[in-house]
Amino acid sequence: MADPLNPEHGCRICGAPLGEPVVDLGMSPLSDVFPSPELAAAERSYPLQVHLCPSCGLAQLHHIADPAELFTEYAYFSSFSTSWVEHARRYADEMVDQLELGPDSLVVELASNDGYLLQHFRDLGIAVLGVEPAANVAEVAEARGIPTLVRFFGREVAEELVAGDRQADLVVANNVLAQVPDLHDFVGGIVRLLAPDGLLTIEFPGALRLLEQTQFDTIYHEHFSYFSLGTVAELLRRHGLAVVDVEELVTHGGSLRVHARHAARGDVPAARVAAVLAAERAGGAFDRATWLSFADRVAAMRREMVEFLETARREGRTVAGYGAPGKATTFLNYCGIGPDLLPYTVDRNPYKQGRVMPGTHNPIHPVEHIAETRPDYIWILPWNLRDEIGAQLAYAREWGAMFIVAIPALALFY
Ligand code: ZN
């Protein structure tokens, strides 16, 4: 078995040698570790470079840190996003209907965060289990009555559950696959855990959308792999699982939800599986040239954003950030946007307030700071939530503030 933490051992799915990077975002600190102002000087940065496997087409990072360092204290609480919680509720309703889940069913979510998704199944009387390595968010889940194993999921956890006579009718893996260093151990565990007629659903931001919309800030150290339907299908195939359907979602800037079952069942995949695969090939998701041209657009985006902020400063207009998501760490560090160009950002998550952005050290304040300081521009850093945040900040229109998003292209709006 190749060492999943060492890129010298090749592609994380197929083992092929990776060669030179296709995207180089320079040095960046860990995106979701928010230092206090006193500790900011001691933080470390690491090269942020994407490699494209010439064989299976998986885009992936060099590893720089141990997952135990990355994910044991996690600052992202899913429940702080209201649109995210609503997305989860609709998904639970659909799955309960489609799979006819009942009191004897078991739903297992891998990387269950603070239990925001499983709570909906629990409310419908279905047995649930979360697996979540970050102890601080797992505690929140337990407190709301969601049984949660504080572990990294893989074959070992799956064997223990099966030995305890537990197999899952539904396994949910949302926005976690990118963060898994050893994909074969993870998917090997899923195959073991999934009941013979069980369903696996996996959500992830698709690589094609990342390329088309220049979503370079979704590249950060905590995301080891950038999947497409094609690469996920290849990974699952190696473990005896088959893709049976795929949905294109609007969440997180355009995600895919892949449905898979044991290949031995012989399910006929929905027609849209072939359609999405064809679109990925036609869009160049597996081609080096597409990734190199993406890198050129990213460099142009940096020049444009820095110029905009420098002009605003020169003309005496004030700018504030809204949100402190992991993607903002990549954006700000790649562009070198410190407190001189973006004096502060705000976040609803109390965990982040009073801390600073990793690397660039822009202070993070409570949301009320915006009303107190009345900035001319409010830069919405989590662009995937622009409508939700724009509505929350309706009061800023009173003093004529304009909103900014930088992705997929710099745009200003009221
Ligand atoms: Zn590969």
Image: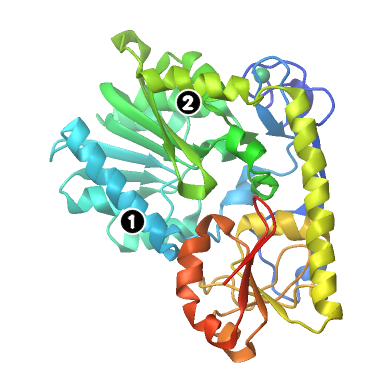
Where, quadrant-wise, is the N terminus in this rendering? top right
Label annotation for residue 213: none
Question: Residue at coordinates 78% horizontally, 25% vertically from top-left?
Answer: 289
Q: Where is residue 91 in the image (x, y as percent from the top left)?
A: 30, 44
In this view of the protein, which residue sits in the foreground, 325 or 177? Answer: 325
Q: Name the residue under label 1.
A: 86
Q: Position of residue 8 (x, y in %)?
A: 79, 24
Q: What is the count of numbered marks?
A: 2
Other-residue count near label 2 (Cα within 10 Å), few / some / many at <14 / 14–19 / ≥20: many
Q: Mark 2 points at which residue?
A: 187
Real-space Cα distance between discs 2 and 1? Answer: 28 Å
Residue 413, image quadrant: bottom right
Sequence-earlier tag: 2 or 1: 1
Question: Residue at coordinates 76% horizontally, 70% vertically from top-left?
Answer: 361
SS assignment at label 2: helix
Ligand 1 under 8 Å from disc 2 Cβ: no
Q: Where is residue 238 in the image (x, y as percent from the top left)?
A: 51, 13
Placement of 338 over or under 229, stated as above or below: below
Residue 200, image quadrant: top left
Other-residue count near label 1 (Cα within 10 Å), few / some / many at <14 / 14–19 / ≥20: some
